[in-house]
Image (cartoon, helix red, strand yellow):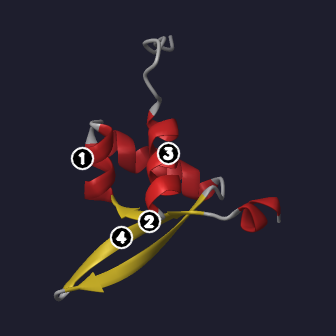
Amino acid sequence: MRKRREKGKMTVREAIIAILAAKGSATLDYLVERTGYNKNLVLVTLSNMAKEGIISRGWMKYAGKKFRIYRLKGREELIR
């Protein structure tokens, strides 16, 4: 049975889309920090969104460490 969400509270998917739309791109840790949701839940949602073609994923190297970057696809990319 699906839980009803509280009035005024965003779903994980809505929160991720809002953050990516405002910021452009973000790491998993940033999304977890900003949404306040469990890391595994955010990761599963991101994976599903990537499979659906809503977001794109890539790698970024910074200070010798690799980070996974998530970006919201543009309107032109979504229409294809």
Mark 4: amino acid: Arg
Residue on which disc 1 sits: 33
Q: Nearer the viewer, mark 2 or mark 4?
A: 2
Residue on which disc 2 sits: 25
* Image quadrant where residue 67 sits: bottom left
Residue on which disc 3 sits: 18
Mark 3: amino acid: Ala
User: How far is mark 1 from mark 2, CA to CA?
Assistant: 14 Å
Residue on which disc 4 sits: 68
Residue in the foreground of this view, choosing between 36 and 66: 36
Residue found at x 45% / y 39%: 15
Mark 2: amino acid: Ser
Q: Nearer the viewer, mark 3 or mark 4?
A: 3
User: How far is mark 1 from mark 3, CA to CA?
Assistant: 14 Å
Disc 1 + disc 2, Cβ < 8 Å: no
Name the spot of residue 55 as percent of width and height, x first: 57, 60
In the image, taking residue 43 as reference, residue 49 lies left or right, namely: right
Name the spot of residue 27 as percent of width and height, x first: 33, 63
User: How far is mark 3 from mark 4, CA to CA?
Assistant: 19 Å
Q: Which mark is residue 9?
A: none
